[in-house]
Image: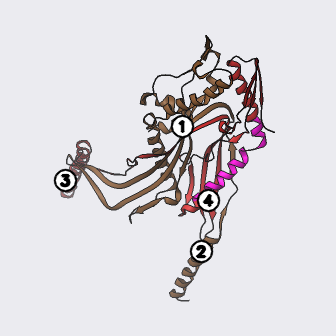
Chain colours: A brown, B red
Amino acid sequence: MSFRYYIIIIILCCCCSTSKQKQSETDAAPTSAILQMTPQSRLYTAEYKIHKIITHNDVIHLKGNLLNQDYNLELPAGTRKLAFPIDVTLKAYVDLTQLSEEHIKKENGKITIILPDPKVQVTSVQINHREKKQLIDLTRSRYSDEEIQQLAKQGVNSILKLIPDMGIIETARLNTTKTLVPILTSLGYSSEEIIIQFRKPFTVDDLPLIVDPENITFLKP
Amino acid sequence: MIILKKLYKKVIWLAILLIVIVLVFFFIKKASVFSSRIKHTETIELSPAEIQAIREIGEWEFLSLPTEELVDTIRKGFFMDDRLVRIYYGTLRLGIDLKQTSADWIKTQGDTVIVKLPPIILLEKNFINEAETKAFYESGVWSESAKQTLYYKAYNSMKRRCMTEENKKIAETNAIVQVSALFRSFGFKEIIVSFPK
């Protein structure tokens, strides 16, 4: 058998392999677990849906020092670019388990409720895989799944940093009042007799207090 | 004797050469005459975040179920198989939507309050946090639709496991405890909380 026949056999094998690939994509049985069931009493009053296009321009630089002179060279054909949209849902809530008789005062027919600080929870993060765009130079590899997850995390982190400027806490306060006032009026109070109080205005320094501890991992750089 | 002298000279030259090489090496290392490293761009670019919708909601959560799901898919090949394994994380939040309450959901009779709550539902439909998803293993090139299929597979499995009658009952029991505690702090002695059958 000549060398030519070997080549034909190898090509045929490759063809069989690729045609088979399309047919035999199988899913294994999923493994799952509920991590910790927690009873709650959270009143969610504001929902923000945020859309962000995450872009990453990965350029390879050769950085160094030659005879005490710094150099920074961009390597040719070593660039790759990625863009993908993410949709994040933030919900602000008041934890009603922290509300006790100490926080409710009744004087002269009026009721005053001092509510706990509102907090923000990331309830959903969706990556739009179908709209993902990659441009890869010859010398580079495609973005791995793990790299894309890391970039998505950075994107969510950057959204969380914007929370104090979004006004979600103020909206949550307003909406909590709108939710509680009808409950109290149905208990016999008139709207003039209801006073709902909150804490001081929030700033960037309060961010670790605002964002739920469940999402604190996002805040780490 | 002459041979020994020649050998002695050669050894001396070799020693000098060795010392010079060692000195040059240390000089380069200490004085940073030449150093280089390859650097990648690791951070994302600055881009604006667009607030698409602000919604006033009234959702009261009574049970949260953080859950994880390991899903994988295999593509059979002639020489070797390709595999994609992912671990999805999400939290299913069970509670009531106050917008579903009837007009007379709270009634008072003296120091008794009767509260009729709407049914327990899943508060957030898209409960998976894809930024927390772990790409456990990836071999071969996978299409975006294959990844999306894995997402839906994990989503359905998580929902099926958590949205059980048993978990809804646990949420209802906690709702009765929490609603009673709230109205008790408003000064009511007897609180009757009910759900639609």
Pair 3/2: label in front:
2
Q: Is residue A141 visible?
A: no
Q: Earlier in the sequence, mark 2 or mark 1?
A: 2
Residues tagged by mark 4 and mark 2 found on one chain of the structure: no
Q: Residue at x 69, y 44 (%)?
A: A33
Pair 3/4: label in front:
4
What residue is pinned by disc 2?
A: A17
Spot occupied by residue B68 in the image (x, y as percentages of width and height): 64, 45
Vertical placement of A77 versus A178: above or below?
below
Vertical placement of B12 versus A9: above or below?
above
Q: Amino acid at mark 3?
A: Lys
Between the C-alphas of marks 4 and 1, the distance is 26 Å
In the rendered structure, the answer to whether residue B57 lies left or right of residue B12 reads: right
**Label 4: element kind:** helix
**Label 2: element kind:** helix
**Label 3: element kind:** helix
Please give the chain letter of the residue carrying mark 3: B
Outermost residue to the top: A108
Whether label 3 touches label 1, CB < 8 Å: no
What residue is pinned by disc 4?
A: B149
What residue is pinned by disc 3?
A: B9
Q: Residue at x 54, y 80 (%)?
A: A11
Between the C-alphas of marks 3 and 2, the distance is 68 Å
What residue is pinned by disc 1?
A: A215
In the rendered structure, the answer to whether residue A164 lies left or right of residue B98 reads: left
Between the C-alphas of marks 3 and 1, the distance is 73 Å
Question: Which stretch did the figure color magenta?
Answer: B147-170
- Does the stretch in magenta take in A26? no
Q: Amino acid at mark 4?
A: Thr
Between the C-alphas of marks 2 and 1, the distance is 44 Å
Image quadrant of residue A91?
top right
